[in-house]
Image (cartoon, rainbow, N blue to C red):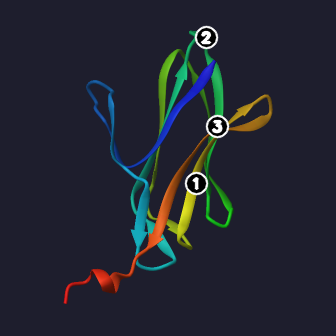
Amino acid sequence: MIKHVWTILCEKIITDQQTNQTSYLTALEGVNTGTFPAAIPYIALGVLWFKDSVDEEPLKFRIILISPNKDEKTLLETEQVLKAGNHRTNIVLNGYPVQAAGTYFFKVQVLKENLWTTASETPLVISLVDQSATKKK
């Protein structure tokens, strides 16, 4: 059986070439912008899966971005065949456009028995900040 372990939003993902260990740097809960529309800066999304048996098993999943007004955009839909152990899925969003402030959700869904089931929903708060208040006089 394949299990979703966790999902994280961060600024950078680094995988060591010698050890294959991964570092998820600067976890993100929110992003500030001075204007809309805006482009989300470099954001990485990491997902860890665990497979508990040695038999190969297909995993079909998708990642959906849900805006504050409930619009949904599929960012990734893929299928992988997993063997036993941990498996990582890492995607990078660089300059993804957003139209408004509010809470966006990155939803990870898995296809099981022809039904999409939600494995996780990770929020990202995008805030409008007054740029004039932060400028020094």
Q: Is residue 60 left or right of residue 99?
A: right
Which residue is most to the bottom? 137
Q: Nearer the viewer, mark 2 or mark 1?
A: 1
Residue appearing at x 56%, y 14% in the figure? 52
Work out whether 42 lies above or below 35. Answer: above
Question: Residue at coordinates 57% horizontally, 22% vertically from top-left?
Answer: 82
Residue at horizontal 53 percent and vertical 53 percent from the top: 123
Find residue 55 and name its label.
Answer: 2
Q: Is residue 88 left or right of residue 115?
A: left
Q: Secondary structure at mark 1?
A: strand
Residue 51: x %, y % from top left: 56, 19
Q: Is residue 68 above or below residue 58?
A: below
Residue mark closest to the camera, 3 vs 1: 1
- Residue behind mark 1: 105
Between disc 3 and disc 2, whose residue precedes? 2
Q: Is residue 51 left or right of residue 30?
A: right
Give how far across and how far down residue 58 sits, in percent.
65, 24
Residue 56 position, x and y percent, is 61, 15
Mark 3 and mark 2: Cα distance apart in space: 19 Å
| Residue 61 - label | 3
Of pointers 3 and 1, the one earlier in the residue sequence: 3
What amino acid is labelled 3 in the image? Phe
Q: The residue under label 2 is which amino acid type?
A: Asp
C-alpha span from label 2 to label 1: 33 Å
